[in-house]
């Protein structure tokens, strides 16, 4: 009798495990089908050559998939390992680096930045790292023609500062929200000075390796990078509109751009899978202490109390009870978006090789898929 009962219980467990396996497989298929529909419509609507996505949940990348072409001329398909420029998403990496150094007591977020650059003798640099992180320092953004598509090569973060350090502040520190990639160049230079390591080395050792982001790296213009996506534009959407020889709506190669002018603010390469891993590491406390993460995702204000919609290196996209933070990115030949629920760790990342594509809506819907899919399970 005991042997019969034992066999019956084993059979029940086998059937139950099979049902669970089928349930998980069906949930994955359902998630992928919903994502396919969203991305296919996005590509058709905006004429995007190639898209890559990743959805993260519970410490895993539950979906990573490429669509379309990474290189139209050579008919190379997008794969999960295809590298895209992060554009401004990497401001989140730089912010984490700065906040880590603050945790370690190697810098003070509220010390005037002039103290870190005594050789520049900048009396007006009373702004702080906190203000730089929140785009409240008054440091200018792109100003001169061609700056956003610079082709000048800078060998390191410190040399790229020559682009803007001699220009006056646009506004008094703290008084105005002024988005500035050059402000993040300063932060990258401060990371180097306070850590004693090169910016890319610090990121590798303290951010990307910790988050298991094996593909993320500096966007070296002259190096051969495996799986690098080509970049494109359509004149009515991108920066080629002023060219008389370009027809509106047609697909063209993006303008040349050497992003060494702004590595800490927009000069990295990554994959959606790596971005999802970064989001998970951030939410789980692998990169920052809880109190520091809370400060990072707290909305900043100007001195007269105006809210900015921006924290310390990230945008605030939705408030309580379902907070969402993240960052968009856009530059020559690429558009990107990363969204994260810091409470649950769920995330979604989307990267494409068309500049000025609108990705916010799809990114938020992909995050919703992660939420709804988890509830079904």
Image (cartoon, rainbow, N blue to C red):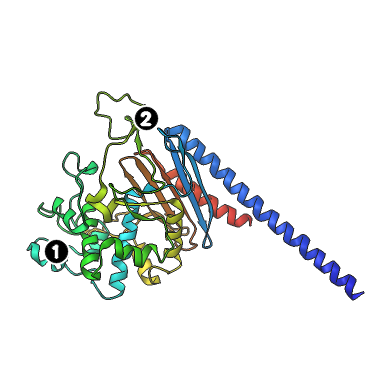
Q: Secondary structure at mark 1?
A: loop
The secondary element bearing badge 2 is classed as loop
Q: Is residue 303 left or right of residue 238?
A: left
* Quadrant housing the C terminus: bottom right
Front residue (pair 152, 315): 152
Q: Residues within 10 Å of mark 2 (few under 14, many from 20)?
A: some
Going from N to C along the chain, the mark reached first, 2 or 1, is: 1
Q: Answer yes or no: do the residues labelled 2 and 1 have beta carbons within 8 Å?
A: no
Q: Which residue is mark 1?
A: 126
Q: Quadrant of the N terminus?
A: bottom right
Q: How many marks?
A: 2
Image coordinates for residue 324, horizontal then vertical, percent: 43, 56
Label 2, label 1: how many angstroms apart (C-alpha)? 46 Å
Q: Quadrant of residue 193?
A: bottom left
Quadrant hosting residue 218: bottom left
The residue at which mark 2 appears reads as 251
Q: Nearer the viewer, residue 51 or 315?
A: 51
Query: What residue do we see at 27% from left, 54% from top?
Result: 263
Q: Is residue 220 above or below residue 253?
A: below
Q: Is residue 180 visible?
A: no
In the image, taking residue 225 as reference, residue 177 lies left or right, namely left
Q: Position of residue 268 (x, y in %)?
A: 32, 52
Q: Residue 374: percent from the left, percent from the top?
A: 58, 57
Tell me the crowding category of disc 1: few under 14, some 14 to 19, or many 20 or more residues within 10 angstroms, Cα based.
some
**Which residue is rendered at x = 59% and y = 53% of the image?**
373
Position of residue 66 relative to residue 19, above or below, is: above
What's the residue at 47%, 63% (across, down)? 343
Which is more foreground, mark 2 or mark 1?
A: 2
Query: Does 278 sit above or below residue 164?
Result: below
Farthest front residue in view: 224
Name the residue: 39% across, 68% down.
287
Residue lying at the far right of the rendered structure: 1
């Amino acid at each position: 009798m005991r042997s019969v009962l034992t066999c019956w219980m084993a059979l029940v467990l086998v059937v139950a495990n099979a049902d669970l396996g089928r349930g998980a497989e069906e949930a994955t298929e359902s998630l992928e089908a919903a994502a396919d529909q969203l991305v296919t419509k996005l590509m058709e609507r905006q004429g995007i050559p190639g898209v890559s996505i990743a959805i993260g949940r519970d410490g895993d990348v539950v979906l990573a998939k490429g669509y379309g072409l990474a290189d139209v001329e050579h008919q190379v398909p997008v794969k999960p390992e295809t590298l895209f420029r992060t554009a401004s998403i990497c401001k989140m990496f730089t912010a984490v680096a700065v906040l880590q150094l603050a945790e370690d007591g190697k810098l003070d977020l509220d010390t005037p930045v002039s103290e870190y650059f005594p050789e520049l003798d900048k009396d007006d640099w009373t702004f702080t790292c906190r203000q730089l992180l929140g785009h409240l320092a008054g440091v200018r953004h792109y100003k001169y023609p061609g700056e956003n598509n610079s082709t000048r090569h800078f060998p390191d973060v410190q040399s790229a500062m020559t682009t803007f350090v001699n220009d006056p502040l646009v506004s008094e520190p703290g008084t105005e929200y002024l988005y500035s990639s050059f402000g993040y160049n300063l932060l990258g230079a401060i990371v180097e000075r306070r850590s004693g390591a090169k910016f890319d080395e610090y990121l590798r050792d303290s951010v990307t390796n910790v988050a298991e982001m094996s593909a993320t790296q500096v966007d070296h213009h002259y190096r051969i990078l495996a799986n690098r996506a080509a970049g494109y534009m359509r004149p009515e959407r991108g920066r080629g509109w002023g060219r008389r020889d370009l027809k509106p709506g047609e697909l063209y190669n993006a303008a040349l751009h050497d992003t060494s002018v702004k590595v800490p603010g927009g000069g990295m390469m990554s994959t959606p899978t790596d971005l999802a891993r970064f989001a998970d590491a951030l939410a789980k406390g692998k990169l920052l202490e809880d109190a520091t993460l809370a400060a990072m995702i707290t909305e900043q204000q100007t001195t007269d109390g105006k809210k900015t919609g921006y924290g310390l290196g990230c945008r605030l996209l939705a408030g309580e009870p379902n907070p969402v933070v993240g960052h968009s990115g856009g530059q020559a030949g690429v558009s990107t978006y990363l969204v994260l629920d810091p409470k649950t760790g769920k995330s979604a990342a989307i990267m494409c090789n068309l500049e000025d594509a609108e990705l916010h809506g799809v990114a938020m819907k992909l995050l919703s898929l992660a939420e709804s899919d988890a509830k079904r399970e």
